[in-house]
Every structure is written in structure tokens, then in C-alpha cells.
């Protein structure tokens, strides 16, 4: 795995805090990953939402969709999402990820990054419905994108990771309590990426 610091130099393997994050390459092979991505791009009823961040309403610079068990709605940034029923592809991925995470997920947020202009700003997945110390499994298909992490109170304490096609990033422990993360915009021409973040909604 290529890990990067804030200036872009490679960090030694295992630099991520193991109590906060685990990164797994090649959970899905390249061909299967691209097939999943193309299926989601063309079949998911993507939406571009208006959300509230830092007291301002903005249009999300990416497309989104929420799937899950019946009744597992999710509210973040002032927007409520009612779950779309699971698809065959999502259930197949979910089963594989659950074996690695040791957790049964009941929902998943899909994000479609169409190009380098699409992004997600600094945030934590710390909504009430996720409970204390949630485990979130992030699966990436398509274009490699930079994933930045920084401590909430010490912004000099930060990491960057290249999230690869077919990879899994597990976020756990105090990750959402004490840290925040983002997918930054890129000035380079980038191809599409679909990201799935599996979660457990408590109600």
C-alpha cells in the first residue's frame, strides 16, 4: 500500500494507527471492482443533495445514495436518507466485508466521485445513529483517490492514504470521536470512483 504524508512522501508500512484504521488491498480483484463500479454508476438512483456544513447550505460535490435494512434511515448535515432496498451486488460485497470486519452491517452509503472536481470536505461520521466508536467499512472501486485524516484539535497530526481500486479501509475505535477525514479535490484529470461505506445504524 502506498501511504503518504502531508507533503506526498511515502511513509513506512504500518504507519496508520492500528487502533483507528486497517487498510486491506485487493479485497476485490481489478476486473471485478471495475464491473461493480460500472454497475453502480448505471443502476443506482444517484442524488446530489443540499447539506448544511459549518452553518452553510451547500450542494454536495458528488452523487450519493443510501441503501439498507427497512427502517434504518440516516440523518447527517441536516438531510434525512431513507434506505433503498439492498441489491444483489451490495449484498455480495456486504457478506465479504462482514467476514473481514467481524460485524453485521445494516446499511451502506454510496458516493460517486465523477472526476477530480468531486470531493468530500473535512468531517467525522459521528452522528447519533452510529453510536459510540462505530466501525465503518469503506470500499473503493475505480480511480485511486487521496484520503486525508487529521486530528480534530491538532491539525498537524495527520495522515494521507491512497485508496486503491478494490481496497477496504476499516475505521474504528476513536477515529470518529477524535479525528476527521476528507477526499480532496484534484487538479489532475481523474476517472470515476464509487465508494461504499458500510455502517451499523442504531435506533
Image (cartoon, rainbow, N blue to C red):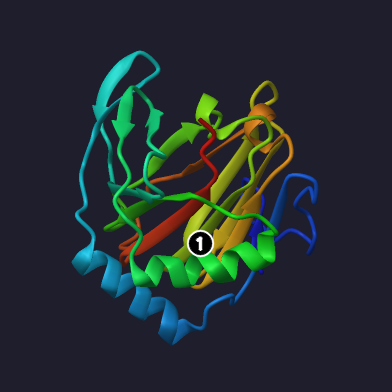
Q: Quadrant of residue 76?
A: top left
> Exactly how many numbered labels are in the figure?
1
Task: Say which of 111 and 101 sits in front.
Answer: 101
Task: Find residue 145 and report its horizontal and vertical position in percent.
Answer: 46, 59
In the image, 161 versus 67, the foreground residue is 67
Q: In which quarter of the image is residue 114?
A: bottom left
Task: Spot the residue most to the front.
Answer: 70
Neighbor class of circle 1 (other Cα within 10 Å; few <14, some 14-19, many 20+) is many
Outermost residue, bottom side: 31
Q: Can residue 144 be seen in this view?
A: no
Q: Is 139 in front, or is 134? A: 134
Q: Can you say whether 32 is above or below 50 in the image? A: below
Instruction: Report the front residue among 126 and 104.
Output: 104
Image quadrant in which you'd find residue 72: top left
Residue at point 56%, 29% (across, down) = 126
Q: Position of residue 193 (x, y in %)?
A: 36, 63
Which residue is disc 1 drawn over?
Answer: 139
- The residue at the point 51 percent across, 52 percent down is 198
In the image: residue 105, left or right of residue 77: right
Report whether 143 appears left or right of 65: right
Q: In this view, does 150 lie above or below 164?
A: above
Q: Position of residue 100 (x, y in %)?
A: 68, 66
Quick one: SS at disc 1? strand
Residue at 37% in and 78% down:
34
40 is higher (above) or lower (below) than 160: below
Coordinates of residue 29 in the picture (x, y in percent): 51, 83
Asked whether the viewer can see residue 78, the reply is yes
Q: Is residue 94 above or below residue 117?
A: below
Q: Quadrant of the N terminus?
A: bottom right
Amino acid at each position: 500500500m502506498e501511504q503518504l504524508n502531508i507533503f506526498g512522501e511515502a511513509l513506512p508500512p504500518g504507519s496508520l494507527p492500528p487502533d483507528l484504521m486497517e487498510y486491506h488491498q485487493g479485497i476485490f480483484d481489478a476486473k471485478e471492482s471495475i464491473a461493480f463500479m460500472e454497475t453502480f454508476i448505471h443502476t443506482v438512483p444517484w442524488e446530489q443533495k443540499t447539506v448544511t456544513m459549518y452553518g452553510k447550505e451547500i450542494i454536495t460535490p458528488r452523487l450519493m445514495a443510501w441503501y439498507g435494512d427497512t427502517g434504518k434511515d440516516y440523518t447527517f448535515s441536516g438531510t434525512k436518507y431513507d434506505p433503498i432496498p439492498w441489491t444483489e451486488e451490495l449484498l455480495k460485497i456486504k457478506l465479504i466485508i462482514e467476514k473481514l470486519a467481524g460485524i453485521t452491517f445494516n446499511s451502506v452509503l454510496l458516493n460517486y466521485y465523477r472526476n477530480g472536481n468531486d470531493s468530500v470536505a473535512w468531517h467525522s461520521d459521528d452522528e447519533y445513529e452510529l453510536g459510540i466508536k462505530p466501525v465503518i467499512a469503506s470500499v473503493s472501486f475505480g480511480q485511486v483517490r487521496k484520503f486525508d485524516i487529521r486530528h480534530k484539535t491538532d491539525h498537524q497530526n495527520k495522515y494521507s492514504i491512497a485508496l486503491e481500486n478494490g481496497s477496504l479501509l476499516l475505521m474504528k475505535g476513536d477515529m470518529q470521536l477524535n479525528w476527521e477525514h476528507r477526499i480532496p479535490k484534484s487538479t489532475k484529470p481523474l476517472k470515476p470512483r464509487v465508494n461504499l461505506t458500510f455502517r451499523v445504524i442504531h435506533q
